[in-house]
Amino acid sequence: MHYDVIVVGAGSAGCALAARLAENPHRSVLLLEAGPDYPDLDRLPAELKYHSHEAASQAQAPHNWSFVNTPVSQQSRTAPTPRGKVVGGSSAINHMIFLRGMPEDFESWAALGNDAWSYSQVLPYFRALETDLDRHDDFHGTTGPIPVRRHPRATWHPWQEAFYQACLAADFPEDPDMNHPQATGVGALPLNNPHDIRMSTALAYLQPNRHRLNLSIRGNALVRRIVFDGTRATGVAVDSGGERFVLEADEIILCAGAVSSPHLLLLSGLGPAAHLRAHGIPVVRDVPGVGHNLRNHPSVGIRARAADGVVLDPEAPRNQVSLRCTAQGSAARNDLQITPTSTNPLYDTSREFRIGCRVELPVGAGRLSLASTDPHVQPIIAYDSLQEPHDRERLREAVRLAAALLRHTAFQGIIAARLAPTEPVLASDAALDAWLLQTAGNAHHTSGTCKMGPTSDPMAVVDQYGLVHGIQGLRVVEASIMPNVTRSNTNATTIMMAERVAAWLR
Ligand SMILES: Cc1cc2nc3c(=O)[nH]c(=O)nc-3n(C[C@H](O)[C@H](O)[C@H](O)COP(=O)(O)OP(=O)(O)OC[C@H]3O[C@@H](n4cnc5c(N)ncnc54)[C@H](O)[C@@H]3O)c2cc1C
């Protein structure tokens, strides 16, 4: 079988890219996905369909790869790294916060030699991917596939309303539009779940394009490795239904996500040569950066017990408002994000409210590497996120700020007590650091493991068009090519990247 393009992985980027490429009826596109395909809303399992369900991202859930990170240095805790395994990918199991990266994020990508990714260059693609149901101006789209809305204030849970009031009382500005380039302060989160349906890229991008006869979508097809003729990628080896196939294409585009794309490159002989040889993998090309620059947002939750009588509704939205602010003395605007959430009594009977605190632009980065040559064995995911003193310092500040907000009178009758961290822990930098190292994990924003950059950067894996350096016919397009994680959740930016590359290929 020979196609013009094979897209590997039907996630946020893969669905968007395949749908856009198939708009050209003369191009044959094959989209391969390791997880199942539910071709319409009626057949979509409830946990993928409805916004309030967290079942989809629970460890060992059927549409979750359920990766686990490896403990590193001072952080002895293993934590889950959920990733979607279904047509729709992580956009089919995520929390639906639809925040864009900040203008400065994209300017920094451009400054690293990727001048096609400056804010002015990417803004048209953020607009193209969305229909913002609330905002109609130069910064928002009105005709794109992903619908975006915010919960009106009158519908906020008292816990969210109290947080909002506490932020205003602490002099943080109101943020009426968190996707505005100047946005900062506290506001209603943009969400891609109108009518409480999680609008994955499978629903938003693939569904309207499934009739196209030049677009083939195959679920339950695990790509084992890329096939090369010298340094040209010519196809992929795939397991499907207990049989093995080799499929060919003029161009292979990896959209397998920031864990599985570098994993596939390594299994296929593209990566640090010594690491490949140690695993007995023939080296197609020495690409030292594959798996390095593993980025994410170090995160920790402050825990408070709900007051008696406060109802925790399993159907209620988990996220409605959020605060973004800048750490003291930091040059990076909005490098802290603080978000109130509630536990879902279906999965957690603790009756707790949490305030998620995270560092948006961490200095620290980890590494992903091979554990085995078996494609079914997950790679080693070593985030090492709190090794940097500056990251710990900012996370301490975020935690202390969240604890201070919780003392505001608006929370009376809503929370009974803060459970963790305790006052003595809050009072001491050393004790708070120890608590962070014990309890902090990462947001689900894994990125950076095949970073883009010019050939002058020896750790760049792809150029700014997603083409793997030194290889023909092979691109990577998704969260792994971000040079650094954005100051935001990563779904909207990942879809934007697919739109951007699709425009080049059109
Ligand atoms: C639980 C959770 C909550 C999140 N919440 C939010 C949020 O609220 N807002 C936000 O902006 N971001 C959120 N994120 C992050 C965001 O969803 C991801 O950054 C984004 O979806 C990544 O897109 P991607 O295209 O890089 O990868 P993915 O969407 O993960 O797609 C990769 C696809 O490739 C497939 N694949 C992998 N390996 C193979 C193979 N060998 N063969 C065939 N197919 C393969 C996978 O099954 C998957 O479908 C969340 C993520 C998770 C997991």
Image: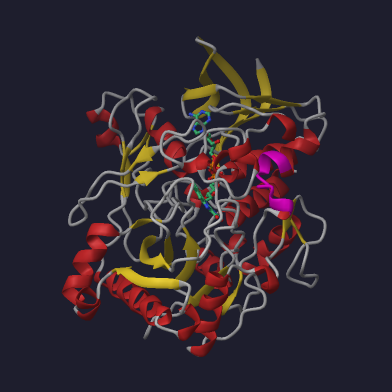
Residue at x 22%, y 71% (from the top left corner) = 432
Compare residues 251 and 216 and report the one nearer the observer: 216
Which segment is the magenta one? Answer: 195-203
Q: Is residue 82 visible?
A: yes
Which image quarter: residue 137?
bottom right
User: Against 192, is 45 above or below?
Assistant: above
For the N terminus, give its image quadrant.
top right
User: Against 111, is 221 above or below?
Assistant: above
Compare residues 86 and 490 and report the one nearer the observer: 86
User: Against 226, is 495 above or below?
Assistant: below
Compare residues 59 and 298 and report the one nearer the observer: 59
Residue at x 53%, y 77% (from the top left corner) = 162
Residue at x 50%, y 24% (from the top left corner) = 223
Residue at the extreme top:
243
For the C terminus, give its image quadrant.
top right
Residue at x 79%, y 35% (from the top left corner) = 209
Q: Is residue 90 left or right of residue 277?
A: right
Q: Is residue 5 magenta?
A: no
How many numbered discs sit on the rendered protein? 0
The spot of residue 481 in percent (x, y) is 49, 50
The spot of residue 265 in percent (x, y) is 42, 34
What kind of colouring is applied to the model shown? secondary structure
User: Against 18, is 305 above or below?
Assistant: below
The spot of residue 430 in percent (x, y) is 16, 73
Which image quarter: residue 393?
bottom left
Q: Is residue 361 visible?
A: no
Which image quarter: residue 295?
bottom left
The spot of residue 201 in percent (x, y) is 67, 43
